[in-house]
Image (spheres, rainbow, N blue to C red):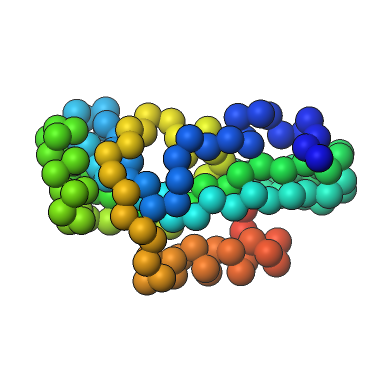
Amino acid sequence: MAGNFFPENYKTFPYSEGDLLASHRSDGRYSINKVLRIDKVVLKAGETILIQNQAFEAPEEDYLLIISMSYGDDEFDSLEAAKLAADKGVWTIKMGHVPNRAPGAANGQTLIGHHPVKEGELEGYNQWKNAFIKGEAGVF
């Protein structure tokens, strides 16, 4: 049962693992980003989570989605160019793993394709997940 500690927009995400998303940067360029994992994290009353390096204690049992993504370099001049690169599976990864709350991960993204997540793409995610389970890592 969901509580009311986390906002509703922390509990939904419009994309799926493996989805390729384009984001439009302020300089007019586009990048390709990939959804690696979507984790439903349940906190029991009294448990804490680090969000942007601040500890939050859940007053009741509740959950949020943590969206792990890789982010590409802003190397495309247009959305069409990003779509073509996504279709070919060719783009530059700038950050291999970033764990984020659903609203931040979805903000400004446009679905442009889908490529199943490969085990080799999960190295950063696996390191983060192990640290997160130990309470040594949080989310943005």
Q: Residue at x 21, y 30 (%)?
A: 27
Residue 98 vs residue 42, the one in the foreground: 42
Residue 131 image point, x, y percent: 62, 66
Asked whether 10 or 124 is in front, the reply is 10
User: What is the count of numbered marks?
Assistant: 0
Q: Residue at x 27, y 39 (%)?
A: 112
Quarter holding residue 102: top right
Rendered location of residue 96, percent (x, y): 37, 59
Quarter of the image with the C terminus in it:
top right
Residue in the foreground of this view, choosing between 121 and 93: 121
Asked whether residue 71 is in view, the answer is no
Residue at horizontal 25%, vertical 42%?
31
Vertical arrangement, residue 121 with respect to residue 138, above or below:
below
**Direction from residue 114 to residue 135 in the image, left or right:** right
Q: Is residue 108 left or right of residue 93?
A: right
- Which quarter of the rendering shows the N terminus? top right
Q: Position of residue 83 (x, y in %)?
A: 19, 41
Residue 26 makes an appearance in the image = yes
Is 124 above or below relative to 45?
below
